[in-house]
Amino acid sequence: MTQIDQAGGLREGEELDIQAVDRFMKQALPGLQGTPTIRQYPGGASNLTYQVDYGHRSYVLRRPPFGKIARSAHDMLREARVMQALKPVYPYVPEIVASCDDHGVLGCDFFVMERLHGIILRQDFPRGFELSAEDTRKLCLNVIDKLVELHRVDARAAGLDRLGKGAGYVQRQIGGWSERFRKARTADVGDFEGVMAWLNRKMPEDIAQVVIHNDYRFDNVVLNPDNPFEVIGVLDWEMATIGDPLMDLGNSLAYWIEAGDAGPFQMLRRQPTHRPGMLTRREVVDYYMEKSGFRADKFDFYEIYGLFRLAVIIQQIYYRYYHGQTKDRRFAMFGSAANYLEKRCQSLIRESRL
């Protein structure tokens, strides 16, 4: 029997006030009875995600991480608004149940959404989930198709056309992520200055302005347990905006680790893209461009940007661990991961013909 994704135990230092959650939930949904059971999903290196159960009624609560965070980061109310606007035109978005801006409840903004009962492919296939190479390829193509479909959403019709800042998206991303890295750098991590300088020199004009997810991965996709080729949900809209679709694809490919990749890169794998039948990164790019109609002569810039951006995200999390703002031992090796990604970027830059 295929395993439906389930939350687990609460991590130390990330527990929620059950009574506060219960009061809020019963105010938002007056028909709820009893005391909730709260569990935590295994992801959540950025925003934290919890399963809140009242008997057979199940919901998902999203809140920012504990500890000091950047002022503009982890805007939970923005994420909820984006999801509400997208839902009518992109049906894979979970329905928002309620949102809260009263910090007297949990000490932060948060929102509650419907729980989608399905399969989420994390580092490896779950127990009972086995696919042939041919079927794995079919699943892979279906997941990429949903990214193409997102990039075709009419932003104006969805009321999201003002979500972005207009032309110059690529330039803003390179400048913004460079600034974030410099602020989050710790003494044991490289400076990435050569990588940032190359990105500044080589950045192209925007290809287009479309709705982008900015964190599209297998572990943010929910599959139908009765038909695992069918995508029924796309999660984690924290960084969604209006921007360049090839930058979005570059972000996704930073997580796309193949079976033949080097050992240090394999250590970063969070999705089963190493399985027989999965497309290679090159095949993903070719398929996406064929289906979407977007074009770029070379994808080097977007691939290197995606890896650099991933390094910044990892470093921002490591900064919190390094300075004792979180006790989560998962983050202890994130500094080493950032150092590896700098070396990988440098290697790709040496090979690039841009």
Image: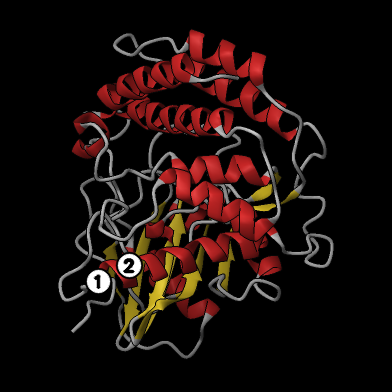
**Which of 2/99 is in front?**
2
Which quadrant would the N terminus be assigned to in this image? bottom left
Kindly state the secondary structure of the residue where label 2 is placed. Answer: helix
Determine whether, in the image, residue 266 is placed left or right of residue 342. Answer: left
Decide: is 143 above or below 250.
Answer: below
- Identify which amino acid the numbered label 2 is placed on: Thr
**Outermost residue, left side:** 127
Instruction: Kindly identify the residue that appears in the image at 20 percent across and 47 percent down.
Output: 12
Relative image position of residue 142 (x, y in whole percent): 48, 69
**Which of 189/69 is in front?**
189
Relative image position of residue 219 (x, y in whole percent): 37, 58
Relative image position of residue 95 (x, y in whole percent): 56, 75
Q: Which mark is residue 195?
A: none
Task: Say if mark 1 contacts mark 2, CB within 8 Å.
Answer: yes
Relative image position of residue 305 (x, y in whole percent): 54, 29
- Identify which amino acid the numbered label 1 is placed on: Ser
Asked if residue 160 shows in the view, the reply is yes
**Which of 56/191 is in front?**
191
Distance from Cα at disc 1 to Cα at disc 2: 6 Å
Kindly state the secondary structure of the residue where label 1 is placed. Answer: loop
Instruction: Kindly identify the residue that appears in the image at 23 percent across and 64 percent down.
Output: 125
Crowdedness near tag 1: few (<14), some (14–19) or many (≥20) residues, C-alpha within 10 Å: few
The residue identified by callout 2 is: 136
Determine whether, in the image, residue 113 is placed left or right of residue 55. Answer: right
Determine whether, in the image, residue 62 is placed left or right of residue 210. Answer: left
Decide: is 196 above or below 59.
Answer: above
**Which of 235/101 is in front?**
235
Which quadrant would the C terminus be assigned to in this image? top right
Asked if residue 238 shows in the view, the reply is no
Q: Which mark is residue 132?
A: 1
Instruction: Kindly identify the residue that appears in the image at 67 percent across and 38 percent down.
Output: 296
